Structure formats: structure tokens, C-alpha cells
Amino acid sequence: MAKWIQGTVVDNIHWTENLFSLKIDADVDNFSAGQFTSLALDIGGKRIARPYSYLSSPGQRPLEFFFYTATDGILSNALVKLESGDLIWVKQKSNGFFVLNEIPKAEELWMLATGTGVAPFFSILNIDEPWNRFKHIVLV
């Protein structure tokens, strides 16, 4: 089982009433663009965790994650209130196969997403590989 490490919130950016991103300083293992990790807070004596895709790219610090505040979301409603200096749990190891080396050879790369689903695409688009590999990239 992956190890939890403590991260520190660097910034909480509110984009709209329900969309926000957290910048977090945490010593995670290397990850690939498009992967995700889990974030957690201890709420009511329980560790509440959810998986979140990186908005940031490998090597980019601080780490950044994109969120939607769900009406009944226990974790998202706590995350939206975090401030610079607050502590958050982060899984040290990342997961996921939503990465470029899983995409077959092609000339075009189509990326379709809504809401916070754009996060892994931003992570991918901020590295050189897709721009060198594909003739056309379309994000919808």
C-alpha cells in the first residue's frame, strides 16, 4: 500500500464559485504526465481520501490539483477552505495509465474532457513529448 506523506498548501486559487485549484508542496515520487494520486484530510476522526489527477507536470513544483466543490462532498467542501500553510495528506506514489506511452502511434491527438477532467490533459500538454510526437493536438 502506498505511503501517505504530509504536504503543505502553498495556494488555494478560486477560479469560479465551485472550481478551485490547490498548489501543494509535497515530496512525492516521480510521476508521469496524466497520472493521479490520492489526497486526504482527517475529518471527524477519519482519513477521507479521494484520487485526483495532477494539473501540474512532472518536475513542476509546487504540485497543482483542480477541484469541483460537490454539494455533498465531504472532502471537496473541506479542501476549498484550505489556506496557505495548512497541511494535507498526499500519497507518495502516483498511479494511472492515462499517459502518452499508452497512446498508439498517430498524427493527431484528440483530448475530450469537461470540468476538472481537463487536469491530466494540462499536465500532458505542459511537457515537450506531445508537441514533438503529434502533428495536430485538439483539446475540446
Image (cartoon, rainbow, N blue to C red):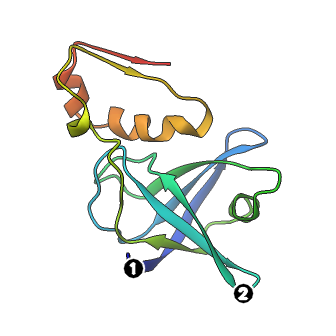
User: In the figure, 56 relative to 31: above or below?
Assistant: above
71 horizontally vs 82: left or right: right
Specify the label residue 77 is tagged with. Answer: none
Which amino acid type corresponds to the residue marked 1 in the rendered image?
Lys
Circle 1 sits in a helix, a strand or a loop, which is it? loop
User: Does 8 sit left or right of 128 as displayed?
Assistant: right
Q: CA distance from mark 2 to mark 1?
A: 19 Å
Residue that numbered label 1 is attached to: 3
Q: Position of residue 99 (x, y in %)?
A: 30, 41
Residue at mark 2: 45
Label 1 environment density (alpha carbons within 10 Å; few <14, some 14–19, many ≥20): few
Q: Is residue 83 left or right of residue 7?
A: right
Residue 131: x and y in percent read: 23, 24
Q: Residue at x 43, y 41 (%)?
A: 120
User: Horizontal and vertical percent for residue 62?
Assistant: 42, 58
The correct choice, above or below, for 60 with respect to 127 in the image is: below
